[in-house]
Image: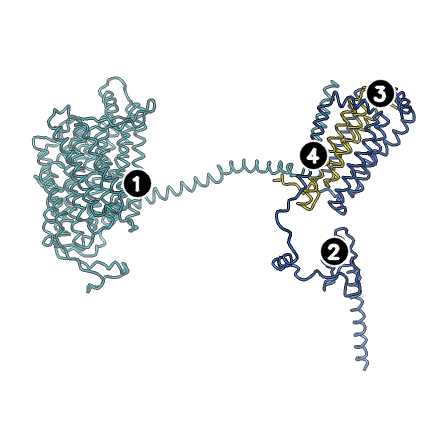
Chain colours: A blue, B cyan, C yellow
């Protein structure tokens, strides 16, 4: 590890980077930008989260390339490993099916946002270009005693107060999250009899919900029962399937069957009439 | 002695407060309390009068300063009283006649369940009227002025369950407001002109002007003040053009008509003009206006009085006319002030007596007021007949009685207005008025007490009042005329004494004129024709008036339903079309003015205002869209703002 | 290659993240975009650290990560409770500021 580090250190001290790093930058940088774009453009939150995780891993590689070994590892372990998983967890909790429709509801918001984002990027780029950074000291000297040791020395001396306060902040955040999401049960849970009585009192869905399937021709749980007019009744399938959008609709089939039946009977009646007429 | 002045006001004021706040407990004794306090005030007045007599003419005025009312920089208003000979005359008249009418009311209002309230109002009136006449500045006078207006309103509308009474009260109040506006403007003008409104300072300042001394006040300003005071007097004293309320005010109980609308309150205008004599002396144009108003009203009231069948309304017309005499006299300047006040006092006696007599008649006739349904009452009500008759003789100016002495002097003074045509005109009008007075009073007398009985059964109040009264008496009760109780007849007798002797007493050695001279100044009038000739002419006119009345109403039977009459009669029955005039000119005009103002308001003012509001509203509505509540929108503006800041920073560095 | 390219990449990622915050309605995705912006900043800080030759930039990036972790904890808790009360994770649904 130390040998590897020392060679990297000599590399990093240079004003220009090695060709390997350049290749790595251009390849991974492109992927990172694509991942970022996918994060904001993917329809489902899960996909966004995965794309973001990818971008973050690439950023971890860049940290390593820039001599921030500790941060690189932390980025992978804490950010990608813990925080993004937390994100995924919340996505699942909130409802994975809640696909975010990308249709814009606020008039002009998308164009304005794109314009602002683009303008901001251009401005930042112009600012960086304008700064004319010509000198890169490299981290060779700073990382000489080891990156982690260097950081630790700084954190526990120069930045010790900031460190302590940040720790307090973290604790506060943890407590705050608990306060926010904790729900006190102020009353006893209802038992089955009371729930039944309440249902009677409210007067809706007194009998059990209707069963799925249509006239016993389908008994799959994901097929909505048909109402007398041929339209499917959402109530007959379970809520989870409904939310996932995994309901199969057979109403068109049933209606066309009905139409065919009527046509057949009409033809038959017509034939009977013809027979009567011929008699 | 000065400390007693406040007691004059305090006694009736206390009565009013106690009676109006005391509640039902006082129902039994309330009227006695009210009467006693009125009498107490009268006794105080008499004591002060005797004290005043004991001093020289110039030292008789007394002052009492109670407290500073509104001390604000240069604006100093005090509650202070001034009792001089003029005020003293009024105090005695008000408390004296007032006390008599309190006594009379005990009998007259006996069956009214709200008698305590009635006496409370009467006491309130006395207090306000006393404040009016003994105030030592115009602002305090204004307080009394409004106070009597309030009391008048309350008393006219005392029987408020009658819509006519309620309407009459409102009418009186509204018409009086016009006059009150004049008084308030006059007081404001005084303050801007003189910087004060105390009688002494204001009148001294105007006096200095007339004598050509320092601090000249332009005649124009004095004329303006004078005209505004005249407007106030017109409102309160029912002079043309603000006369229309007096006839309707007869809806109030008869003692009220006698006290307020005959003897005292309606003469407040005369008091105001006499008190402000110095201002009018400095403004001849205003004086001429006063004289014209007086002359017009004295004819107007007399003509109205000739046509009315309602006994109280006939007397109201007469009141209007007699006050016209007083205003006329007050407008004549120093030659007339004293006679105006003298006629005021004698008129207070005989007109109050006449009203009380009318009340007594109504009391006996089931509250019937139509004289065509009276007739032949002299046998049934001898005391009323006698006192009414003496009052009648006094008012028409029968030689030797009160009216003769005071009215004759006014006619003389009117002829002395100037040497030219105006003297003749005003004198002639006053003379003609005397004749008409004789006519209508004789008419009242004949229709009420002489001739056949034309009594009608009163309509049963429980039946439809518009139904024909049944001839056999089933529809109602035939009146049973009877003499009134002692509490009513005694005040009438006292007033009759006043009607007979007051004038002679005042004229004895010109005592009344000398009494008032320190306050109002006095000059002997020099009529265009000799005094005996005027007296003779007055007598002739008087006899002619009486004779015509006798031919029309004495010799011939009086029809129960009024004949159609000539155009003038019909107009006079409708108060010479005053209400129609008011309706057409003021009400319609006001309506049109209001409508056009409303139109302007709706289109122009509202247009501008609403237009501004609408433009801002529209702008806001558009701006509001920016505040759509979406956090993302706000975030866009944040990012945009950041971009602008970065751009600005870069630009600044580049430059 | 000039290491300043890392800064260009960082600014590009930051702008993409900002745009994502503005155009996405799902609160969770918005949160991810914020994380993306924070990460872009971190990249810039690391690059700065290399530029200056000392570790202060990395320290700040480290603190940024800690604060980001705290922020994620609270933010996700808010989203969860919001979803519980409104049955929606859309930021547009919480538009009570509208008149």
Q: Secondary structure at mark 4?
A: helix
Question: Which residue, given by chain and number where applicable, does mark 3 sit on?
Answer: A145
> Which residue: 34% across, 24% down?
B72
Residue B524 versus residue A179 in the image, above or below: above
Mark in the foreground, 4 or 1? 4
Disc 3 to disc 4: CB gap under 8 Å: no
Mark in the foreground, 4 or 2? 4
Left or right, C71 with reference to C1: left
Query: Mark 3 or mark 4: which comes first in sequence?
Result: 3
Residue A173: mark in rendering: 4
Marks 3 and 4: same chain? yes
Disc 1 to disc 2: CB gap under 8 Å: no
Disc 4 to disc 1: CB gap under 8 Å: no
Where residue B42 sits, quadrant-wise, is top left
Chain letter of the residue carrying label 4: A
Answer yes or no: is residue B495 visible.
yes
Chain letter of the residue carrying label 2: A
User: In which quadrant of the rendered image does the C terminus of chain A lie?
Assistant: bottom right
| Measured Cα–Cα span from mark 3 to mark 2 | 63 Å
| Measured Cα–Cα span from mark 3 to mark 1 | 108 Å
Query: Mark 4 or mark 2: which comes first in sequence?
Result: 4
Question: Which residue, given by chain and number where applicable, does mark 2 sit on?
Answer: A238
Pick whichever, B571 or C66, lies toward us. C66
> Which residue: 19% across, 28% down?
B3
Question: Which residue, given by chain and number where applicable, does mark 1 sit on?
Answer: B175
Query: Mark 3 or mark 2: which comes first in sequence?
Result: 3
Mark in the foreground, 3 or 2? 3
| Measured Cα–Cα span from mark 1 to mark 2 | 85 Å
Q: Secondary structure at mark 3?
A: loop
């Amino acid at each position: 590890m130390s040998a590897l580090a020392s060679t990297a250190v000599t590399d990093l001290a240079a004003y220009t980077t090695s060709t390997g790093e350049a290749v790595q930058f251009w390849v991974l940088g492109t992927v990172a930008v694509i991942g970022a774009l996918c994060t904001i453009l993917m329809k489902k939150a899960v996909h966004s989260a995965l794309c973001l995780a990818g971008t973050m891993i690439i950023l971890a590689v860049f940290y390593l390339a820039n001599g921030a070994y500790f941060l690189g590892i932390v980025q992978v372990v804490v950010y990608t490993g813990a925080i993004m998983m937390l994100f995924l967890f919340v996505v699942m909790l909130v409802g994975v099916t809640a696909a975010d429709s990308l249709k814009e509801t606020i008039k002009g918001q998308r164009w304005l946002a794109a314009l602002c984002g683009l303008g901001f990027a251009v401005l930042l780029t112009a600012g960086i270009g304008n700064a004319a950074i010509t000198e890169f000291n490299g981290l060779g000297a700073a990382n000489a005693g080891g990156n982690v040791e260097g950081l630790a020395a700084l954190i526990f001396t120069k930045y010790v107060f900031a460190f302590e306060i940040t720790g307090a902040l973290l604790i506060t955040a943890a407590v705050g999250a608990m306060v926010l999401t904790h729900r006190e049960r102020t009353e006893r849970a209802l038992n089955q009899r009371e729930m039944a009585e309440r249902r009677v009192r409210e007067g809706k869905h007194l009998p059990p919900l209707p069963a799925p399937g249509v006239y016993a021709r389908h008994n799959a749980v994901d097929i909505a029962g048909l109402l007398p007019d041929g339209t499917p009744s959402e109530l007959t399938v379970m809520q989870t399937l409904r939310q996932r959008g995994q309901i199969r609709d057979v109403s068109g089939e049933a209606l066309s069957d009905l139409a065919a039946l009527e046509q057949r009977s009409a033809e038959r009646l017509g034939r009977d009439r013809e027979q009567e007429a011929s008699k | 002695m000065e400390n007693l002045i406040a007691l004059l006001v305090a006694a009736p004021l206390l009565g009013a407060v106690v009676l109006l706040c005391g509640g039902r407990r006082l129902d039994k004794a309330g009227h006695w309390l009210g009467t006693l306090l009125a009498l107490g005030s009268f006794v105080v007045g008499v004591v002060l009068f005797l004290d005043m007599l004991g001093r020289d003419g110039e030292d008789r005025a007394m002052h009492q300063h109670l407290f500073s009312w509104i001390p604000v920089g240069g604006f100093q208003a005090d509650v202070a009283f001034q009792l001089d000979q003029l005020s003293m005359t009024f105090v005695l008249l008000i408390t004296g006649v007032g006390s008599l009418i309190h006594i009379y009311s005990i009998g007259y209002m006996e069956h009214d369940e709200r008698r305590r309230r009635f006496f409370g109002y009467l006491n309130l009136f006395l207090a306000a009227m006393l404040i009016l006449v003994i105030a030592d500045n115009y602002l305090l006078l204004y307080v009394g002025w409004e106070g009597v207006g309030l009391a008048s309103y309350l008393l006219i509308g005392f029987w408020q369950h009658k819509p006519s009474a309620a309407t009459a009260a409102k009418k009186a109040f509204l018409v009086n407001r016009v006059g009150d506006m004049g008084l308030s403007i006059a007081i404001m003008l005084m303050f801007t002109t003189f910087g004060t409104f105390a009688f002494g300072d204001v009148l001294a300042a105007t006096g200095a002007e007339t004598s050509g001394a320092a601090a000249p006040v332009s005649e124009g300003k004095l004329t303006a003040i004078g005209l505004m005071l005249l407007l106030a007097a017109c409102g309160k004293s029912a002079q043309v053009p603000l006369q229309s309320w007096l006839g309707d005010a007869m809806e109030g109980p008869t003692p009220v008509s006698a006290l307020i609308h005959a003897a005292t309150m309606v003469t407040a205008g005369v008091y105001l003009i006499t008190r402000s004599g110095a201002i009018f002396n400095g403004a001849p144009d205003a004086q001429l206006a006063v004289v014209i108003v007086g002359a017009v009203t004295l004819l107007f009231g007399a003509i109205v009085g000739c046509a009315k069948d309602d006994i109280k309304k006939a007397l109201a017309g007469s009141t209007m006319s007699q006050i016209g005499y007083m205003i006329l006299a007050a407008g004549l300047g120093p030659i007339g002030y004293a006679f105006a006040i003298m006629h005021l006092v004698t008129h207070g006696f005989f007109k109050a007596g006449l009203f009380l007599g009318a009340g007594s008649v109504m009391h006996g006739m089931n509250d019937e007021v139509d004289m065509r349904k009276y007739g032949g009452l002299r046998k049934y009500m001898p005391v009323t007949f006698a006192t009414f008759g003496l009052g009648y003789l006094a008012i028409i100016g029968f030689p030797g009685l009160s009216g003769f002495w005071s009215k004759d002097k006014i006619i003389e003074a009117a002829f002395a207005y100037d040497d030219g045509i105006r003297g003749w005109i005003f004198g002639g009008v006053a003379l003609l008025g005397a004749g008409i007075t004789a006519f209508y009073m004789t008419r009242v007398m004949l229709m009420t007490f002489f001739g056949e009985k034309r009594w009608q059964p009163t309509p049963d109040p429980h039946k439809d009042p518009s139904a024909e009264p049944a001839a056999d008496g089933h529809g109602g009760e035939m009146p049973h005329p009877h003499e009134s109780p002692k509490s009513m007849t005694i005040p009438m007798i006292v007033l009759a004494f006043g009607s007979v002797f007051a004038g002679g007493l005042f004229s004895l050695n010109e005592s009344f004129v000398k009494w008032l001279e320190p306050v109002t100044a006095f000059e002997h009038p020099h009529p265009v024709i000799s005094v005996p000739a005027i007296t003779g002419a007055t007598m002739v006119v008087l006899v002619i008036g009486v004779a015509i009345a006798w031919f029309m109403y004495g010799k011939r039977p009086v029809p129960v339903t009024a004949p159609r009459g000539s155009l003038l009669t019909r107009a006079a029955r409708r108060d010479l079309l005053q209400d129609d005039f008011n309706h057409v000119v003021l009400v319609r005009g006001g309506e049109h003015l209001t409508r056009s103002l409303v139109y302007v308001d709706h289109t122009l003012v509202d247009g501008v205002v609403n237009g501004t509001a609408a433009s801002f509203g529209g702008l806001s509505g558009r701006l509001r869209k920016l505040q759509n509540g979406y956090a993302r929108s706000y975030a866009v503006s944040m990012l945009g703002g950041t971009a602008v800041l970065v751009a600005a920073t870069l630009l600044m560095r580049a430059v | 290659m000039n290491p300043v390219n890392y800064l260009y990449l960082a600014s590009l990622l930051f702008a993409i993240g900002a745009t994502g915050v503005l155009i996405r309605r799902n609160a969770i995705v918005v949160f991810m975009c914020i994380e993306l912006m924070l990460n872009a900043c971190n990249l810039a800080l690391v690059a700065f650290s290399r530029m200056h030759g000392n570790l202060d930039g990395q320290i700040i990036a480290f603190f940024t990560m800690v604060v980001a972790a705290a922020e994620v904890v609270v933010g996700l808790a808010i989203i969860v409770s919001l979803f519980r009360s409104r049955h929606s994770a859309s930021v547009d649904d919480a538009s009570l500021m509208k008149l």
